[in-house]
Image: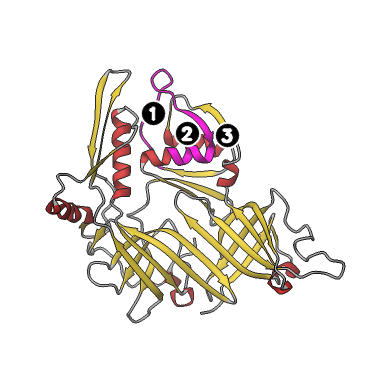
């Protein structure tokens, strides 16, 4: 394995060489519905007067912006993180050479999570409320239309938590994901609020036990106990009518067919009468209750999980979270399209590695997979 090229910036200025020379390890964690986290580990050495380099040099200050550009060996640098200083964690031992400073930074969700507020969004849909929230911070947002509009004289949409927690709650009830990524051109944070893009063009192939192998290892888990549908009911207080949802997901099927259909047959064979779950405390509106049931069903149906580690040198690129990827070399049923839920990227001791969690709702291939794409052919994001 080889080292990737990287550059760290503080408030837009490149990290000074004397500081970067003490960088022993960097780690980036990205995932749906979570704050992206960057961790930088610097070695500490005591100066003659007793102070420690980096720690006592006022390099890192509250509120400063930290960003990371990274590339695989031989690849094109990409801005993969923009965020803000969150924690300083100095560590000391009796052996001075074991002393280090961990610097943690969170993405823009940290700023949205700073203030709890009580406010309302009259005559707005959930996606429009999300746009209003991000507008407070001057952050661009890519939002899917959530459809249901909450009118002021019917059911007022009220927030009583932080902007980040409220976004997570709105995303959850629509079956959406929410996360921040740097804009590929400006490097500024950009928010995604919408359904996981299961029908987008996949990233380059992840390959095991074949020519052009680029995976160090990969594990799979196939769940046989997940519900095939979500049901819900409530009384609309305005129309005084019962509203119901009994729906499956409308999300893209990533392979031959939904695997929960097969597992449902197995559970019924084992003695179950039905394989379903309730939607707890649904919004009693016809459109909203069905959107929530469909969204939760989409989560339930992601029953195939892949966990693995890749070598970016052999992959010839960086695997990114929140996108699809093709996995092959794992047999007829497991080979296919997966959605990358999370990625952990680590640069340590001159070696760049990535580990990931990817999910799928189907076994077998659909027949439309474009296998053979290499990472170096993909445009930088």
| Residue located farthest toward the front when viewing the structure as drawn | 94
User: Quick one: label 3 or label 2, which is nearer the N terminus?
Assistant: 3
Judge from the rendering whether residue 362 lies leftward or rightward of residue 187; answer left or right.
left
Q: Counting other residues with Cα less than 10 Å from the Cα at mark 3, is it few (<14), some (14-19), or many (20 or more)?
A: some
Q: Residue at x 25, y 72 (%)?
A: 331
Residue occupying image coordinates x 63% and y 51%: 84
Q: Is residue 148 magenta?
A: yes
- The reply to whether residue 77 is visible in this rendering is no
Q: Secondary structure at mark 3?
A: strand
Residue found at x 56% / y 73% = 4
Mark in the foreground, 3 or 1: 3
Observer able to see residue 228? yes
Does 163 sit left or right of 214 as displayed?
Answer: right
Which of 94/29 is in front? 94
Residue identifier under label 1: 149
Quarter of the image for residue 296 reads top left
Q: Write the start and end of the magenta stretch as one range.
A: 144-169
Residue 68 place in picture, x, y as percent: 60, 61
- The residues tagged by marks 1 and 2 sit, at their Cα atoms, a distance apart of 10 Å
Q: Which mark is residue 324?
A: none
Neighbours of disc 2 within 10 Å: few (<14), some (14-19), many (20+): many
At 28% from the left and 68% from the top, the residue drawn is: 335
Judged left or right of residue 253, residue 39 is right
Whole-number angstrom distance, CA of label 3 to CA of label 2: 16 Å
* Residue contact between numbered discs 1 and 2, judged by CB atoms under 8 Å: no
Q: Is tag 1's residue or tag 2's residue first in the polypeptide sequence?
A: 2
Q: Give residue 254's position: percent from left, percent from top.
A: 28, 57
- Marks 3/1: CA distance? 24 Å
Numbered disc in front, either 3 or 2: 3
Q: Label 2 belongs to which residue?
A: 129
Q: Which residue is mark 3?
A: 116
Q: Position of residue 156 (x, y in %)?
A: 43, 23
């Amino acid at each position: 394995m080889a080292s990737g090229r990287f550059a760290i910036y503080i408030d837009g200025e490149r990290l000074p060489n004397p500081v970067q020379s003490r960088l022993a390890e960097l780690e980036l964690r990205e995932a749906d519905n979570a704050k992206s986290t960057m961790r930088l580990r610097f070695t500490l050495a005591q100066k003659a007067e007793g102070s420690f380099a980096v720690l006592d040099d006022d390099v890192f200050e509250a509120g400063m912006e930290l960003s990371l550009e990274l590339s695989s060996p031989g690849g094109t640098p990409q801005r993969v993180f923009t965020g803000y200083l969150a924690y300083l964690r100095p560590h000391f031992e009796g052996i001075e050479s074991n002393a280090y400073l961990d610097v943690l930074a969170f993405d823009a969700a940290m700023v949205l999570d700073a203030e709890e507020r009580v406010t309302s969004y009259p005559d707005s849909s959930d996606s429009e409320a999300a746009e209003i929230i991000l507008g407070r911070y001057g952050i661009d947002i890519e939002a899917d239309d959530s459809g249901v509009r909450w009118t002021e004289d019917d059911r007022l949409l009220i927030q009583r938590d932080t902007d980040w927690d409220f976004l997570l709650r709105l995303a959850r009830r629509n079956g959406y994901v929410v996360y921040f990524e740097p804009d590929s051109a400006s490097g500024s944070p950009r928010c995604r609020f919408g359904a996981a893009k299961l029908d987008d063009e996949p990233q380059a192939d992840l390959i095991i036990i074949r020519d052009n192998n680029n995976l160090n290892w990969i594990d799979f888990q196939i769940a046989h106990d997940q519900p095939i549908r979500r049901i819900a009911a409530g009384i609309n207080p305005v129309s005084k009518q019962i509203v119901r949802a009994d729906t499956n997901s409308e999300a893209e099927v990533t392979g031959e067919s939904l695997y929960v259909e097969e597992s449902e047959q197995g559970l019924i064979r084992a003695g179950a009468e039905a394989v379903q779950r309730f939607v707890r405390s649904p919004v009693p509106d016809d459109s909203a209750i069905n959107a929530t049931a469909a969204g939760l069903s989409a989560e339930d149906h992601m029953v195939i999980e892949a966990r693995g580690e890749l070598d970016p040198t052999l992959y010839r690129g960086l695997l990114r979270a929140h996108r699809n990827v093709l996995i092959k070399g794992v047999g007829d049923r497991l080979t296919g399209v997966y959605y990358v839920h999370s990625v952990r990227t680590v640069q340590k001791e001159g070696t760049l590695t990535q580990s990931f969690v990817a999910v799928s709702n189907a076994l077998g291939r659909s027949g439309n997979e474009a296998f053979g794409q290499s990472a170096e052919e993909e445009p930088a994001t």
